[in-house]
Amino acid sequence: MQVGIVGFAGSGKSTLFELLTGARPDPGKIHSGQVGVATLTDPRLNFLAELHQPKKITPATVEFLDTPGLLAGSHADNPQRLALIREGDALLIVLAGFAGGDPVAELTSFREEMHFADLGVVTNRVERLEASVKKARPDREVQLKELELVKSIQATLEQGQTVASMGLSDEEKKPIRSFGMLTDKPQVIVLNGPQDAGLPDALRALASEALSIDAKLELELSQLDAEERAGFMADLGITDLGRDRIIRAAYDAVGIITYFTAGEPEVRGWNLERGSNAVEAAGKIHTDLARGFIRAEVTAFEELRQAGSLKEAKARHLQRLEGKDYIVKDGDVIYFRSAL
Ligand SMILES: Nc1nc2c(ncn2[C@@H]2O[C@H](COP(=O)(O)OP(=O)(O)OP(=O)(O)O)[C@@H](O)[C@H]2O)c(=O)[nH]1
Ligand SMILES: [Mg+2]
């Protein structure tokens, strides 16, 4: 899972990238996009580690991609800059809330830039396909179908609507998947700046789930030792840090849940697309585990926590045997039985 950190130049993307991933932004990498890995602080993992005393603890992770900012008012190379994020699963749009700017106008024009870039891509594709279907070719039928699809996307974008608003199924989207339509991606909107003002209502109206963070301050806090940090936070009246909220919001936007495997060698969190079944979950670990799947022994994390130990959870019959079609839930602790 990869989330592109995007926005206009100077909005604080690299500051946020460093806060989320702990990786130093490298100016030499920015033009191709710099990848960093963020681990979600998850108290459930600590509890499981207490129980199992494993040799290794591996949290679930998400990749963030720091990208060069767009330049306001210069359409020309913005689509090219935006091309970097076409492979991402979601976009984290960072708005500058610290330099007296107008975040609502900033979000509106950023969305326009994405719109414009998508329109460029589909218009290009429409033109190519129109030329191509004029010739007799074996895949003409397939191309005619794709042409119909890209034309309807083009019309939608021209009317000011997003690709996401079309509600296309994964199957319908197959021909355009490689385009990575930006206006089809889930968005996490982050207002970066001092927290006293809170989120303006006008921004909430545009992005109901918008979050706010003071990335610079929080990055500075993260570099202190725990005691100093607690002191500063108390002095500044900060009770809640934004880092984990943002990572959690990225998981939710993409539709990713976490399940756990727990044993003596390793306690580990795994990312899984919401709605996946037990075999698909097994496949995240190893294809053999999925191929040889017999059953999944599942305990909900909260029940395990209340029972206090796996033994007690079993005694209370809280461990369930589930088959291939079982839909895995966030927080499930799973032991897979496999014939391979
Ligand atoms: N006051 C204030 N300054 C900030 C905040 N976040 C970032 N800055 C400053 O704004 C400047 C730009 O921050 P960056 O994180 O480099 O911004 P960016 O979006 O990566 O910029 P580009 O990569 O050039 O597009 C730096 O000088 C930061 O220290 C903030 O929350 N408050
Ligand atoms: Mg930057």
Image (tube, helix red, strand yellow):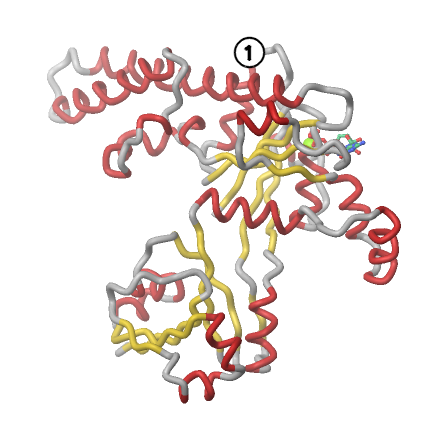
Q: Image quadrant of residue 99?
A: top right
Task: State the image coordinates of residue 271 (x, y, percent, origin top left).
Answer: 45, 57
The number of discs equals: 1
Q: Amino acid at mark 1?
A: Ala
Residue 228 vertical placement versus 161 (above, below): below
Image height of 54 relative to 174, above or below: below
Image x and y of residue 75, in percent: 56, 12
Q: Viewed as shown, does residue 293 lie left or right of 157?
A: left
Task: Identify the residue under disc 1.
Answer: 76
Residue in the image at 21% along x and 15% along y: 132
Q: Mark 1: give few (<14), some (14-19) or many (20+) Cα within 10 Å.
A: few
Q: Position of residue 315 (x, y in %)?
A: 41, 89
Q: Residue 187 versus residue 271: which sits nearer the camera?
A: 187
Does residue 249 appear left or right of residue 132 in this picture? right
Image quarter of residue 249? top right
Q: Position of residue 45 (x, y in %)?
A: 57, 69
